[in-house]
Amino acid sequence: MDSRNRAIIIQAIIAGITIIAVTWGTRYNWPDYVHVKHGLPLTWGIHTLTTIVGPADTWELNLVALTLDLALWLALILLTSIYLSRKIG
């Protein structure tokens, strides 16, 4: 396999990991509060499904956490790209 093709494959894998990490949702089934937290490593969104008073469908968004989460993963892509270009070239 050509080294350039290997670099493209690695970058595609990291981009896929980034998409999964940003959209990752973890469901918490507490007795009076069922919700899904989105984001990895920072929680940028909470989707509340059920509260003690009944069903709910609300979102809480933390745009600072979303921005930092995206910056972290995009920096990982950038650093991997720089590393691979130096290793290949």
Image: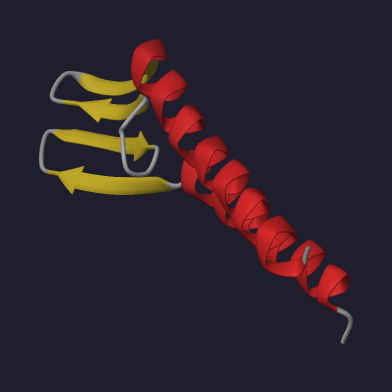
* Residue drawn where x is 67% and y is 67% of the image: 87
9 sits left or right of 33 in the view: right
For the N terminus, give its image quadrant: bottom right
3 sits left or right of 76 in the view: right
Q: Nearer the viewer, residue 72 or 4?
A: 4
Q: Is residue 35 visible?
A: yes
85 sits left or right of 64 in the view: right
Where residue 8 appears, as percent x and y from the top left, is 80, 62
Height in image: 46 above or below 58? Answer: below
Height in image: 48 above or below 21? Answer: above
| Picture quadrant where residue 48 is located | top left
Q: Nearer the viewer, residue 27 or 39?
A: 39
Height in image: 59 above or below 75? Answer: above
Height in image: 58 above or below 15? Answer: above
* Residue drawn where x is 13% and y is 43% of the image: 30
* Residue drawn where x is 60% and y is 57% of the image: 83
The image shows a total of numbered marks equal to 0
| Picture quadrant where residue 52 is located | top left
Check the image and tell me how it is coloured: secondary structure
Q: Is residue 61 visible?
A: no
For the C terminus, give its image quadrant: bottom right
Where residue 67 appears, as percent x and y from the top left, is 45, 19
Q: Nearer the viewer, residue 35 or 43?
A: 43
Q: Nearer the viewer, residue 31 or 14?
A: 14
